[in-house]
Amino acid sequence: MLVILILFITGLCTMFASLHPNKALPKYLGILGILIALVTLHLRLGLGLDFPAFFTMFPLTRIMTVIALFLILILFILQRKYEKDYDWSAVYSLMLFSTCGVILLLGQQNLLILFLGIEIMSIPLYVLAASKKTQAASLEAGLKYFILGAFASAFLLFGIALVYGTTGSFVMNEIIHIQNINGVQLPAYFHIGYIFIIIAILFKMAVAPFHFWSPDVYDGSPTVVTTFMTTLVKLGSSVTMYYILVGYFRHQFDNYFKFLLPIICVSFLLGAILGLAQNNVKRMLAYSSISHIGFVLTGIILGIALQDMSLFVFYLLTYTLSSLIVFSILDYIENGNAVFLDHLNGLSKHQPLLAVAFAIGILSMAGIPFTGGFIAKYRVLTGIYQINGWMFAIGLLSSAVAAGYYLKTLNRIFFYENNQENFAIKNIYLVVIMVILSIMILILGTLPELLLQGIHKYFLA
Amino acid sequence: MQLILILPLIVALVAFFMPNKLVKEFSLAFSGSFFLLSLYVLFKYDPLNYYNFIYYNETFLVGTGGSLHIGLDSIGVMMFALTNFVIFYVNIMAWEKTYTRSFYGCVFLMQFALIGVFASLNAILFYFFWELALLPIYYIVYKWGNGKELNKTFVRFFIYTFVGSLFILAAFILFAVETKSGSFEITEMAKNSLTGKTQILYTIFLLIGFGVKIPIFPLHSWQPSTYRKAPAEGTVLLSGIMLKMGLFGLLRWLVPFQDDALPIIQKVVIILAIIGTVYGAIIALRRNDLKLIAAFSSLSHVGLITAGIFAYKFVGFQGVAFQMLVHGINIVGILYIFDIIERSTGTRYLSDLGGISSKSPLFSALTLIIIIGTIAVTPLTNGFPGEFLLLMSVFLYNPILGILAGSTIILGAAYLLRVYQRAFMGEVSEHVSNFKAVSAFDLTALGFIALLVLVLGIYPQFILDISANGSQYLTNLLELKNN
Amino acid sequence: MILAKILILSPIVGFLINLILGKKLGKASGILGTVAVLISFICAIFMYQKVVSDGAYEVPFFTWMHISTLHIGFSLWVDELSSWMMLIITGIGTLIHLYSIGYMSHDKGIGRFFAYLNLFIFSMLMLVLGGNFIMLFVGWEGVGLCSYLLIGFWFKNVEYGHAARKAFIMNRIGDLGLLMGLFLCIQNFGTINFNEINSIAAGDLALKASGQLGLYQPYIYTAITLCLFIGAMGKSAQIPLYTWLPDAMAGPTPVSALIHAATMVTAGIYLVVRNAALFELAPFTLNTILVIGMATSILGAMIGLFQNDIKKVLAYSTVSQLGLMFVALGVGAYTSAMFHLTTHAFFKALLFLGAGSVIHAMSGEQDILRMGGLRNKIKLTHLTFAIGTLAIIGAPFMSGFFSKDEILEKLYNHSPVVWGFALASAAITIIYMVRVYTLTFWGKFRGSQEQESHLHESPSSMTLPLIILAIFSIFGGLFNLPHILGGGLSQKMAYWLSNINSLKVLPPHTSHLSHSTEIMLMLIATAVVLVLGSFAFLKFKKQTNDQLVKPRFGFSLWGEKKFYVDELYHNLVVKPMESMSDFCFYYVEHYFIQPIVFGSTRLFYGVGQLLRTAQNGNIEYYLAYIAVAVVIILTSILFVF
């Protein structure tokens, strides 16, 4: 809770700091705040501030919070070439607020907090999506996101209401308890409520067939916002899904997880096939994220079935890391808003290190060995095989098809001649961070036990 | 000695950051010393001690079943030497050209991955190296390839190989999950066995996965166009060593796990392989592009090797091991020759060539030796022992198939001598008239290959002794499981 | 032992020195090459004596391949047969080498030429000395390779290159047969050692003689021997694999002499004799050999009748004579075949070298229609060529007379019909050989002025071999005189050869021919030779220029066109192969192999494009999709669960 407070205050500070003539001030304030938050987490301060019926720092929460803070830290540190002519103060503060929502989701104990978290996470995003005020696409993205998001919130609220109506409680433990007692005798509208909540979260995760907003929004938003969405938002909503499946409605898992399987399959295939037909890199990666979130969802289900959270945590970690790399570099490349394949041409000639880092990020997404993506995907696939052979086949097929479009981007970077001059700008921060991140991905791919054991030691000991 | 395995990676990293001026000399020196080192390893191979020199077992990739379990067994040590040989020759071939450091880096990265493939005793580790080996070759093929529709060719190559490797992964996962062992150690895997449908699936998956790389007919459509568009060095890597990955994979990851020996699949594969053998040879009869001839010749030779594997006989395995090595040497020689021709005349179309013999007698003599060695079953050249044993194993499996496979000794002679006749004999053609003299450097390098052709042909027992161990192991395993 | 090593290594040393230093040595390379073979010849003489006195022995070198139970030693087996072959190879080989010094003296590639010749001799020695099938195969392939190199020696000529390739590939077809026979031996007998196979066959022969079933099924022997015979067909130019031999004339003339007389083509005969015991167990194969040999003999002779190229005539005569030898093998007259092989080696070498001398004199002209009246210009060549002709047509008391007569006798013993055919073949031989001889040396000179002015006798290095070979062509019959004429020399060669393992085990050959029949047969043959020979001589001597160049029609045109066999092969084998190659490349690859992957990528692209239309950017559609999805999920949950 203390972390959320710190971030919230930092957000407020950055918002007011934008009044200061120094445009860089909000950014540094933000970085400072995040660092403080990280230190608090490390020192385990503020544990007493938790409210058992509302918000608790589970070990999972701590892990995810650290990852989330880490991600947003990097987002903040990165220097952007158009930083000067774009009002960033609001962006920073909104991101911080949204992060508050994410962290709230990570430790929720209560359906109300869930709703609150989702809204706190989403509302700044609607604004962020539309933050390039001069661009119609950005505004359109914001509006679309807002309308569809509101739709989803309605589902969520309706679901929560139904569940409350049957159980008379918002609190996780109580809901579990009531289900324990009543067994199967809960009324039908409890189940409908449950389904509605899940659908709302599926929407937030952008799982097919609730994914329609994501390509448009990813494409229209400023790339930095897209980065934020593919990393932190995915993190928050996935963990929420985990809580719903194994927390609030643990007893319904065996009854209902099967209806998620076709949805996952559809995500696999849609993400792969639709991405193939794209020229717009951001849209392409949006579809790729649909496919990946399918894997995450599978990881969650498997994690519950096999009692091994690390499946989806690891997947999320590698996926967010690699998309952080890829989107940050797209951010560097982008000219205007959209990034088309042509814009990637010849990056390797001008920025070889960035090109290699981008390649590692993409390869990790494609699940090539020696990158974290392989380990993550491999573990999930092994799990899927145990559930259903056909799903396993579809998972592999989607990897194969998706590899096709990942390859396209790599071809552009390495083998095409450059036709524009915007790679000339050197950005040492970006290069260094990207190299570090790509090395991290390689380490995740070759020595995952280092990380897993480290996490275990740090958080659970 | 385990350092041998990691050394190429270090060299690759150094090469990536070297100045372009120096990298050529650096790479040649290193690849040459690797080659000498591998000769030392080969000569010191002790058949009594199964995993010589290089054996290492360490936990790695916890949670995936992977481990750092490596060792060079008898056939592996031959492939190790072949890898270093091919990489050495790639560097030699690149000597006359202007490649940047990333080329050399890729080549050494490839070497690292290839050695890993041949040394892995853990399925996941194997898969790691398998995929790693693909990346540099993609880069080399696309970056330095040329010709129309390179993109299309490359996409085809990529799809084939990538999908192929996914099949391999699927097979391994299948094995681990279905046997409930969850272990990917080859020693552990050997203790378990699949049955029924899952075994058929395992076999088919691996056949597709490795078959693409080999390639087994009809999975070869990537091959001719890729050979054609890839730079000469890329082609050398592809046919000299990468297709051995597939063959080696079959030997190591499929044959030992064939419990019921699956007679139907065995028959189907042998028939397909022999169709490929004849089909490749027939196509090669009339092609005009030297590289296409090399591609289809490769298809033909490799088909026979595949058939030899699936004959499940000791002689077959011996032939496979020998021929894998020899095909590597000879195809490098052939492609090197073609490259010299292309470099000196600016064309690689037979219709433009003629009369090189008059221009460079020594070059044509060496060419003739290498071509004779590549023509199947010519005694006292290295082409004899391997192909002889392979044909024998196929014949012992089924005489009719043996005769069909044997037709390759006629067709092989036909298309290769056609090349020699068209390019080297006859009157000097227009393109050849300003044939640049072949440098002493190239002649020495080719001479060494020619020497290998003769030495291995006259005294093959040296290699057969090394491979006997591995072949015996496979034969025993199969007999044990069948009885 | 040491002799055998010198014998085998001497040519290979000659080969290596000539190959590496050939350019620097110049003409000395010829002498070097000749000496190398001469050394072998001397060794061969001593070895022969040793074998006759002490019996056969093995000379092991090293283990070549060792694969589980199959042990392939690099070892030589010296017995009467192999040392007899050795003598022919090295003896005639030496003479041909000697001859080549003169013949090739103007050629730049003389070093290379002698290197190949030496390699040829080496391969042939390997072939006959090999103690097992693999060693034989080494030599077998080796001579094929050398013939390729030598036929295509003048590499600038595209036609020669074709001929060389054709020879190699035709041989390869035979090799495949041999290889399959070899595999069958391994499969059934588990060994490839001649002596072991022989003792297996001997066991079965003995069982058969006592009326029992053999250890192995008869069809196994039939299969093995048929395969081996296919191999023999390729090397010894039998129907249908004979067309390479006449084309092999593309090489320098000494090469033709070497291929046709002493080496290569005799390999098939040798193979059958070496495995006579196996063949004896397969009557079907023997009959096949008989029929094919007979057909080849007559076809070769017929084509020879209508050829105008002096070397082509000789080449077809070789095909025909080889056919005759196979006929002999077909009736089980193994030693007779060997005898004819020997005498044939003498006179065919003589004829070829003589023809070479003529060509040399005529500045490269090979067409007999442009020769004529050479008897006064190149007397020595004429004399020796005449002796060669007499020998090949079987004029009385020449070597060919005895060897041919012996075969005819054995054939008559087998069946008079076969004898009749063989006699017919011999009769045609008489006509075309006399034709060649007469047109070349008698009548008027028909060549150009320039050629006439250059006419000269060959140097002594070329005539000396001619003289030696002529002497042997006359007296070669002494090796194996028939009983009735024999005295101390009668059937000497048959006696020697009967010691070898494969012949030792055969049932004793019973001849039910009386002496009077033998004499009668001999007289008939003599009469045919005299009548036909003199008739032909007179006829061709009188022929004028116009009669000669008159265009042919009907049967003789067919004959001149070699009965269109080459064209037949071209249309039946080569063309279909080529169209198949193009068909596979342009159609199978394009319409069958490639769509496997491109079809699937197109499918995914197509589906992708289709689905893209759903993502049209209109928010109301999106809401509708979501609503539909929710409804589907809810209903499915309600109904399914």
Image: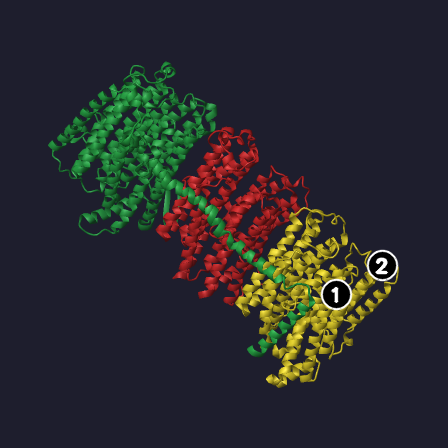
Judge depth for marks 1 and 2 and give the one in front. Answer: 1
Q: CA distance from mark 1 to mark 2?
A: 25 Å
User: What x and y, as percent, mark residue A38?
Assistant: 77, 66
Q: Residue drawn 43% across and 62% down?
A: B259
**Subunit of label 1:** A
Q: Which mark is residue A281?
A: none
Specify the colour of chain B: red
Instruction: Give above or below for C584 relative to B423.
Output: below
Question: Which of the chains is green?
Answer: C
**Subunit of label 2:** A
Is there a contact, CB below 8 Å, between mark 1 and mark 2?
no
Q: Which mark is residue A142?
A: 1
- Name the residue carrying label 2: A23
Between C110 and A179, the residue placed more toward the observer is A179
- Callout 2 secondary element: loop
Between C288 and C60, the residue placed more toward the observer is C288
Q: Amino acid at mark 1?
A: Gly
- Callout 1 secondary element: helix
Question: Which of the chains is yellow?
Answer: A
Left or right of C289, for residue B229: right
Left or right of B136, for residue A232: right
Please indicate, yes or no, whether residue A318 appears anywhere in the rendered image: no
First in sequence: mark 1 vs mark 2: 2
User: What x and y, as percent, mark residue C127?
Assistant: 34, 37
Q: Amino acid at mark 2?
A: Lys
Instruction: Give above or below for C579 relative to C354.
Output: below
Please indicate, yes or no, whether residue B217 appears anywhere in the rendered image: yes
Left or right of C484, for residue A54: right
**Which part of the image, by quadrant, shows the C terminus of chain C?**
bottom right
Q: Are marks 1 and 2 on the same chain?
A: yes
Between A273 and A435, the residue placed more toward the observer is A273
User: What x and y, as percent, mark residue B178?
Assistant: 50, 67
